[in-house]
Image (cartoon, rainbow, N blue to C red):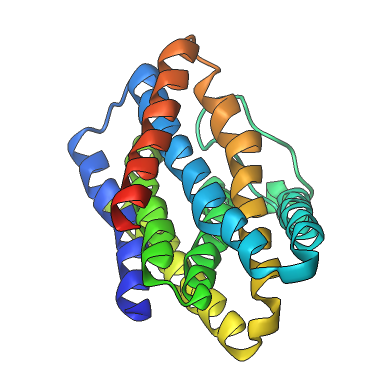
Amino acid sequence: MVLLTALGVGGATVIGSIIGFAFKKISHKFSDIVLSFAAGVMLAAAVLGLILPSLEYGGKFGLITTIAGIFAGAVCLSLIDRLVPHLHKLAGVDTETHEHNAALSKVLLFVTAIAIHNLPEGIAAGVGFGSGSPSEALLIAGGIALQNIPEGMVIIGPMLAAGVKPGRTFLCALATGLIEVVGTLLGYFAVSVASAILPFALAFAGGTMLYVISDEMIPETHAHGSERGATYALLVGFCVMLISDVLLG
């Protein structure tokens, strides 16, 4: 089940990229709506599938462990975000400057940016299986897979617009999907070997997802004049996962 889930989580990005090829020119408004929906899905998956179970399994020091894990995950991703050379956007002028960026191609930098976020998402999916509850694990994995589809869609257009050949663009999308497969397996084996770290690991994974939502997804979806639609799309995504949690429960 873990392996199939890993392949499903990673494959969702590839499915999204295939859809992206069919709709090469995606408007900012549509992109903002689908990414906001994905942010709502991720938010619910982080809270319902990772942070609340961390409190449940943490025992006597559950609250302290969970808070520590959330901040550790956010700080870890923030450090990676600062230290690893990458671009947040492949095309356009709205980019961050990082050391050694000039030595790397834009395509590699863009793929690196996606990988920074996909690896912890995969780890979150794998950690979820350590809880021993298939329904909670599938909720997390399903949420991540669901948000990977629009993410895969919106990365294709900018890469093609920058002159990247379709074949190479698809290989880049495939690589980002494989990173999530690796992350899922890493997360699962980590909590399987040391089950004592499960509460912290769950909160850590939740913290990384909250960081991505706040630092990347919400600012991006509110930058093109579609704030209200993006907000409602986030709420819809959250409620979809809430309904799924109730039905699975």
> Which quadrant is the N terminus positioned in?
bottom left
Question: In the rendering, at what x and y percent does residue 163 appear?
Answer: 38, 39
The residue positioned farthest toward the front in the image shown: 60
Question: In the rendering, at what x and y percent does residue 49 appear?
Answer: 50, 56
The residue positioned farthest toward the left in the image shown: 22
Rendered view: 103 above or below 221: below
Rendered view: 158 above or below 178: above
The image quarter in which residue 204 lies = bottom right
Q: Nearer the viewer, residue 199 or 74?
A: 199
The image quarter in which residue 187 lies = bottom right
Q: Is residue 51 visible?
A: yes
Rendered view: 118 above or below 239: below
The image quarter in which residue 201 lies = bottom right
Residue sitting at 70 percent across and 48 percent down? 101
Left/right placement of residue 46 relative to residue 98 reads left
Number of marks: 0
The residue positioned farthest toward the bottom in the image shown: 193
Q: Nearer the viewer, residue 209 or 128?
A: 128
Question: In the rendering, at what x and y percent does residue 199 appear?
Answer: 67, 69
